[in-house]
Amino acid sequence: MLSLNLAISVHNGRWALLVAMLAAVDFAPPALAADPRPGAGFYDVAPLDDPSVGRCDWLGRASPFVFQENDYIRGYFEPANLAAYRQAIPAPFTMPQRPLIRVTFLDFYDMASGPTYLETEVAVLGMDGAQPGWVVLTLPVTNGVACIGGRQLFGLTKVVRRITLERATDRYVGTLYARGGTKPDVTLAVDIGEPDKGAPELLRQYGIYPQFGLLQGRVLRFAGSGTSFAELARRGDYQIRLGRARLDFPREQENLLQRLGVGPPLAAHWSRTRVRYTIKVQ
């Protein structure tokens, strides 16, 4: 039986933002569009392991993970198929008043203890009772321990896949590869500059909501401090640059985003977070 001891220590005692970035996800291959069950064909149906990357497994690790710094790109999109969106949400979550799709690429590149790794999140806005939050449909990661830890401790639908995040002065490109590690499955590019109309307001309203995990039927919530990005940036240890998103994926039925139906981009940004927290598994 695994028990979790989660401690968060914040640089300069400024803010405790991110237990949310323990993201998790799962990629859904076979098309199950005819299945009326909530979440069918979208939520946690992909094979966990990738022979080109590794297994979703503890791999004998018992020492804690100590996170220090990460950066990420994130895009928000209008849904293009509300029927598919509704089907993608697993019980007990329900449809929000304004459906939204979120795609994120994160790089945990500065670890005081534990392996560095990347992850990709595809999430939809949903409701847990009266609380809005992000329901993760898939959260591929590049490390097997991060995968199994996210699944068993936080109820996040993680799988192991190959992921890259390329950086230039004003352009960031994240690529998730399909199982096997050769075929791009999702590519998100964020070009820093003039944001989409209404983007700052959308980020103020929807960027602060928590991420939902579903552990043996129990809903877990991560992050969602309620503090705006602008306020976090003013406090230090956090940077944000707005821009515009471009999302590419194969127009094939086995691709999750193709089945979900993704409309035009609404907002996008690059961010860097400097906060120290420790996950101990005993």
Image (cartoon, rainbow, N blue to C red):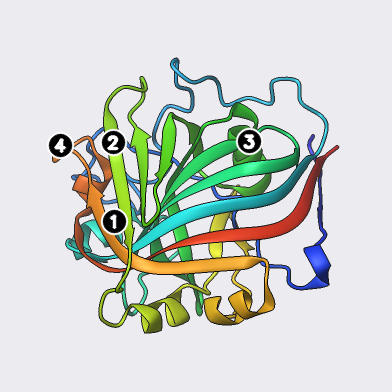
Q: Which residue is mark 1?
A: 87
Image quarter hosting the C terminus: top right
Q: Which residue is mark 3?
A: 116
> Which one is earlier in the sequence, the residue at label 2 or at label 3?
3
Q: Which residue is mark 4?
A: 252
**Front-most of residues 178 and 171:** 171
Answer above or below: position of 17 versus 55: below
> Which one is earlier in the sequence, the residue at label 3 or at label 1?
1
Give the Cα separation between the discs numbered 1 and 4.
19 Å
Image depth: mark 2 or mark 1 in front: 2
**Front-most of residues 79 and 93:** 79
| Res. 217 in view | no
> Which one is earlier in the sequence, the residue at label 3 or at label 4?
3
User: Please, what is the three-letter code of the amino acid marked with disc 2?
Assistant: Asp
> Which one is earlier in the sequence, the residue at label 2 or at label 1?
1
x, y percent for residue 1: 79, 34
User: Please, what is the three-letter code of the amino acid marked with disc 4?
Assistant: Glu
**Front-most of residues 14 and 84:** 14
Give the Cα separation between the discs numbered 2 and 1.
21 Å
> Which one is earlier in the sequence, the residue at label 2 or at label 4?
2
Q: Which residue is mark 2?
A: 185
The kind of secondary structure element at disc 3 is loop
> Residue at coordinates 31% horizontally, 51% vertically from top-left?
189
